[in-house]
Amino acid sequence: MSSISTHVLDTGLGLPARAVPVRLSRITADQTVLLTEGATDDDGRITGWEPGLEPGTYQLRFDVAAYASASGQSIFFPEVTVTFTISDERHYHVPLLLSPFAFSTYRGS
């Protein structure tokens, strides 16, 4: 089974994005099931999620509006949703790079 972690960096401030609420869900043909949720630590990371993910489609939802409000920023995207496929038994790291008017993500290591 696979594991997952994430890391959010505020590239506008040049700092880790602390206390970003994140939800991990599994998506099937008929439903979306919330598996776990948490918030990024002082280094912008969530590393403790080890739910034993089987192959399938998953989604990370980053509550950017909550982070923007807490950090006194105005950010164009109130949430970022990243949908991805797990196909084998490896660790999956999905970072998010965030700025006031843009974001990007990639498959990390």
Image (spheres, grey):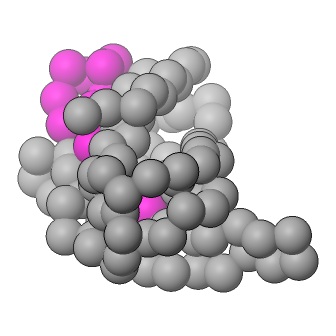
- When asked about the image quadrant of residue 40, the answer is bottom left
Q: Which residues are magenta?
A: 7-22
> In this image, 90 relative to 26: left or right?
left
Callout count:
0
Q: Nearer the viewer, residue 31 or 11?
A: 31
Q: Residue at x 62, y 30 (%)?
A: 76
The spot of residue 44 in percent (x, y) is 21, 46
- Horizontal and vertical percent position of residue 62: 50, 53
| 9 magenta-colored | yes
Can residue 18 be seen from the camera position used here?
no
Viewed as shown, does residue 38 lie left or right of 45?
A: right
- Left/right placement of residue 30 relative to residue 39 reads right
User: Where is residue 2, by image quadrant?
Assistant: bottom left
Would residue 56 be seen by someone viewing this image from the given angle? Answer: yes
Residue at image point 31% right, 20% down: 11
Q: Nearer the viewer, residue 61 or 48?
A: 48
Quarter in which the C terminus is drawn: top left
Up-down: is 36 above or below 60? below
Percent x, y for residue 26? 62, 70
Task: Give the residue drawn at x 53%, y 51%.
Answer: 87
Farthest left residue in view: 42
**Front-lying residue, 90 or 58:** 90
x and y, in percent, of residue 8 in the image: 31, 40
Occupied quadrant, residue 1 = bottom left
